[in-house]
Amino acid sequence: MTHVVAISPHLDDAAFSVGGLLAARARAGDRVTVVTCFTGNVAHPTGFALACQLDKGLDAHVDYMALRRAEDRAACAVIGAEAVHLPLLEAPHRCYASAPELFAERRDDDGMLAPLTAALAEQIDLLAPDLLLGPLAVGDHVDHWLVRDALAAIGAPVLLWEDWPYLTRAAERPREPVHERHVLTDDDRAARTAMCAAYTTQLGFQFGSVERMRAAIARIDEEWLYVPGGG
Ligand SMILES: [Zn+2]
């Protein structure tokens, strides 16, 4: 059996970006595992990290990451995928203090690359993927670039997806060589939509509403995978 392992920066990225492809692989009998990197908890978030929770309509006392881990388990359950959650802290819980900083250069005092690389190397050893997938970092989120750079440092063969919904706001498609254009079937699209709908805390922020998310996915015909570093 083929083992497909998707390395997702945040709790939603793999489903948002390649949910249809993962669903197709699962339906074909492949084992699918989604490893999400930045799922760690901070007991009492403050400042920008707290703001990221409050602007999703969640009170300060809500365990935001626990909620998102549960959403991810529900999303993976849609296609029978396994969910692995690494307890690393996402950018607002590190040294990034505003939304623009999340899409700017990696900060010098951000020491995440080494522990992330070590944690992902361990997972790849453990899971022994036949097909390893990760983010191209379309949209330039610092956490997405960290995952791309960590995967490059590990050196295992990997194919990279176009980060969605960032892709819809990008001026042009990535320049790396395209490896595969997965044409979405109706079943793929339905599964991707159902997976995405599980991330209820993110839908308003990312799309405006669940209906808009559904409409956006209805317009997507293909999910493209790229070979890293070639462009
Ligand atoms: Zn993300």
Image: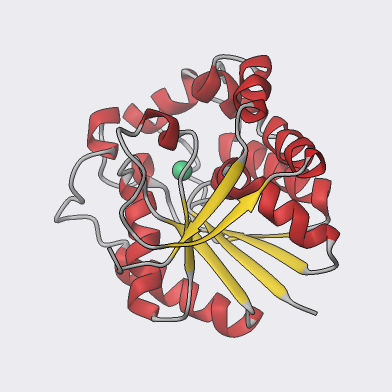
To which quarter of the image does residue 123 belong?
bottom right
| 37 sits left or right of 198 in the view | left
Question: Residue at position x 33%, y 55% from top?
Answer: 145
* Snapshot colouring: secondary structure
Query: Residue 52 location in percent, x, y?
Result: 43, 27
Query: Residue 56 location in percent, x, y?
Result: 53, 20
Question: Residue at position x 71%, y 74% from top?
Answer: 3
Query: Residue 46 location in percent, x, y?
Result: 37, 31
Which residue is nearer to you in this view: 48 or 164? 164
To which quarter of the image does residue 154 belong?
bottom left
Which residue is nearer to you in this view: 20 or 45? 20
| 169 sits left or right of 211 in the view | left
Question: Residue at position x 23%, y 55% from top?
Answer: 110
Which residue is nearer to you in this view: 20 or 105? 20
Q: Which quarter of the image is occupied by the C terminus?
A: bottom left
Which residue is nearer to you in this view: 85 or 193? 193
